[in-house]
């Protein structure tokens, strides 16, 4: 019987490597690999809340919202977004505004002449972010800025996290207690989203959040409509109007001057707008 066959060149090389490493190397290898332990489990990550998670119900306008409107507002318009004839009412109001006999102040006229486009765009914009509206207020501040305002019950902490997760907004908390979500790119989102006391939320022009929050927080103003300190506030005049898809009070103060009228006088008007007519209601 022949003796054991000698290893070939490859086998010899492997045998030499094993002898060189020896038992110590084997021990080190076992220490490094060792028996498989339980897999590491990452701590559960909390889901990022959406705006819809943080806010309950849909935004509305009620007496409390009207009471919060400063008396020197140049325009107060209540919009019922649930009304079946809202689109027709918006078209009617735009047509009324374009009429030379409407006697509308310039700043107010520019806003009302596009109220249909603005209303639909704002509703869709907020809806994509999980904020549904049943009704809203459109205001014009003394400086001519347009403000959208409504009330919706939200949990502030989850709402802030949801807005921050959006990526397009940055959150700023104010010492007064208000919160502003400012756009990182105003060309994509041209508003500051403001949150005030009493579950009030609104959209104001980008960069004007602090100033307009301060204005909205005023308890009184030096003068009401037409510069008359004794005049009834626009919101009170609006509240007295019978329900309609659109209720509008134009309250232009006399010191603003520029108006679309032959005489140059500063008009005021209360309007009740339906899908079939624009009714001007005398005080």
Image: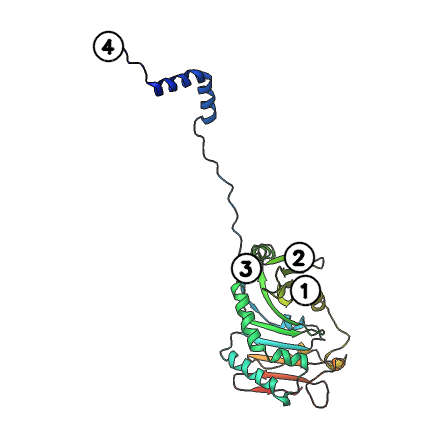
Q: Which mark is residue 2?
A: 4
Disc 4 is placed on an element classified as loop
Badge 3: few (under 14), some or many (20 or more) residues near its Cα, within 10 Å?
many
Which of discs 3 and 2 lies nearer the camera? The answer is 2
Q: Are marks 2 and 1 in contact (CB under 8 Å)?
A: yes
Q: Position of residue 152 (x, y in %)?
A: 58, 65
| Disc 3 to disc 1, C-alpha distance | 20 Å
Q: Position of residue 40 (x, y in %)?
A: 48, 36
Name the N-terminal-most of marks 3 and 1. 3
Secondary structure state at the residue bearing disc 3: helix
What is the CA distance from the residue labelled 2 to the residue labelled 1?
Answer: 10 Å
Label 4 – label 3 distance at C-alpha: 85 Å
Front of the two marks 3 and 1: 1
Q: Is 277 left or right of 239, judged from the image as shown?
A: left
The disc at residue 172 is 2
Which residue is the extreme one toward the left? 1
In the depicted structure, whether residue 2 falls above or below residue 277: above
Q: Which label sits on residue 51?
A: 3
Q: Which residue is mark 1?
A: 209
What residue is drawn where x is 55% and y is 87%? 277
The answer to which of 5 and 215 lies nearer the viewer is 5
The answer to whether marks 3 and 2 mark residues whose Cβ atoms lie closer than 8 Å is: no
């Amino acid at each position: 019987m022949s003796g054991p066959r000698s290893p070939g060149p490859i086998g010899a090389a492997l045998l030499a490597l094993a002898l060189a490493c020896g038992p110590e190397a084997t021990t080190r290898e076992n220490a490094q690999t060792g028996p498989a332990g339980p897999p590491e489990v990452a701590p559960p990550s909390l889901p990022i809340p959406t705006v819809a998670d943080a806010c309950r119900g849909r935004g509305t306008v009620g007496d409390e919202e009207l009471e919060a409107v400063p008396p020197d507002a140049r325009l107060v318009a209540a919009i019922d977004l649930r009304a079946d004839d809202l689109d027709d009412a918006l078209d009617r109001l735009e047509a009324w505004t374009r009429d030379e006999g409407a006697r509308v102040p310039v700043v107010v006229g520019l806003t009302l002449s596009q109220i249909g486009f603005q209303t639909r765009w704002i509703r869709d914009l907020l809806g994509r972010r999980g904020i549904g509206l049943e009704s809203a207020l459109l205001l014009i501040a003394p400086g001519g800025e347009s403000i959208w305002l409504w009330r919706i019950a939200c949990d502030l902490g989850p709402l802030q996290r949801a807005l921050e997760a959006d990526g397009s907004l940055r959150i700023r908390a104010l010492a007064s207690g208000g919160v502003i979500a400012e756009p990182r790119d105003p060309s994509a989102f041209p508003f500051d989203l403001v949150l005030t006391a009493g579950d009030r939320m609104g959209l104001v022009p980008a960069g004007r959040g602090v100033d307009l929050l301060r204005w909205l927080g005023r308890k009184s103003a030096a003068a009401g409509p037409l510069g008359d300190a004794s005049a009834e506030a626009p919101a009170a005049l609006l509240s007295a109007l019978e329900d309609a898809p659109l209720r509008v009070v134009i309250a232009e103060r006399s010191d603003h001057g520029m108006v679309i009228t032959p005489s140059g006088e500063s008009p005021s008007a209360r309007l009740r707008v339906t899908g079939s007519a624009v009714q001007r209601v005398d005080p």
